[in-house]
Image: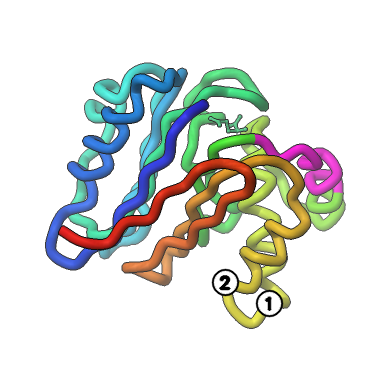
């Protein structure tokens, strides 16, 4: 199993905390890693096949107080930069990291493809973030869209989601998979 890390704060930089978290998760095994930082200029997303150290080489580590990160163990689509997390919806509004499997992703993908969505990766995860984007069109807010999408997605998973317009917020959910929330210094 892979690992996910998220951080929301006010004073401390997210980047070193995410990298430290990813390194603590390395023992679980993984084939690629990635992170997304919600910075003043928008979302910086970096992904790399290989070790967290290679991700550090690729990342600028820009100033941000909100971020999510991931070590991937591929289940849908081979190890590659394109299949590595975080994944974004096609408009770049939302980014997601996901641990586990969305069992019915092919049915959801078919529905979204029918609506004109295109996908750059082979993952079940990219399907989920685009389902959230689609449900956001009719939901009153992102929380409802996220919950609606997750009710439609079957499987065992933990996910963290960020909205480019909501600094200081990470949406998180789990189903038959562990996810720990902590508050403090
Ligand atoms: N199913 C997702 C993928 O293949 C997540 C795999 C994992 O848990 O790392 O990208």
Instruction: Tell whether position 155 is magenta.
Output: no
Q: Secondary structure at mark 2?
A: helix
Which residue is more in the foreground, 180 or 44?
A: 180
Spatial separation of the CA atoms under disc 2 and disc 1: 7 Å
Residue 140 against residue 103 in the figure, above or below: below
Give the quadrant of ligand 1. Answer: top right
Does mark 1's beta carbon lie closer than 8 Å to ligand 1?
A: no
Residue 52 image point, x, y percent = 30, 25
Which residue is more in the foreground, 81 or 34?
A: 34
Q: Secondary structure at mark 1?
A: loop
Residue 96 image point, x, y percent = 51, 49
Check the picture and name the quadrant holding the C terminus. bottom left
Residue 176 against residue 145 in the figure, above or below: above
Q: Residues within 10 Å of mark 2 (few under 14, many from 20)?
A: many
Which residue is more in the foreground, 175 or 22?
A: 175
Residue at image mark 1: 139
The reply to whether the C-beta atoms of the residues labelled 2 and 1 are less than 8 Å apart is yes
Residue at image mark 2: 142
3 with respect to 59 (left or right): right
- Which residues make up the magenta segment? 101-110
């Amino acid at each position: 199993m892979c690992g996910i890390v998220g951080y929301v704060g006010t004073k401390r930089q997210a980047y070193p905390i995410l990298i430290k978290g990813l390194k603590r998760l390395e023992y679980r095994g993984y084939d690629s890693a990635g992170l997304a930082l919600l910075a003043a200029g928008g979302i910086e997303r970096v992904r790399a096949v290989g070790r967290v150290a290679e991700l550090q080489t690729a990342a600028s580590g820009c100033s941000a107080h909100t971020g999510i990160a991931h070590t991937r163990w591929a289940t849908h689509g081979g190890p590659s930069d394109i299949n590595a997390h975080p994944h974004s919806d096609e408009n770049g509004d939302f980014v997601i990291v996901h641990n586990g499997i969305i069992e019915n992703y092919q049915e959801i993908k078919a529905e979204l493809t029918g609506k004109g969505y295109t996908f750059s990766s082979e993952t079940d995860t990219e399907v989920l973030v685009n389902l959230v984007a689609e449900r956001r069109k009719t939901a009153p807010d992102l929380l409802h869209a996220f919950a609606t999408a997750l009710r439609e997605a079957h499987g065992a998973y933990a996910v963290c989601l960020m909205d480019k317009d909501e600094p200081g917020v990470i949406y998180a959910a789990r189903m038959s998979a562990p996810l720990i929330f902590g508050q403090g210094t």
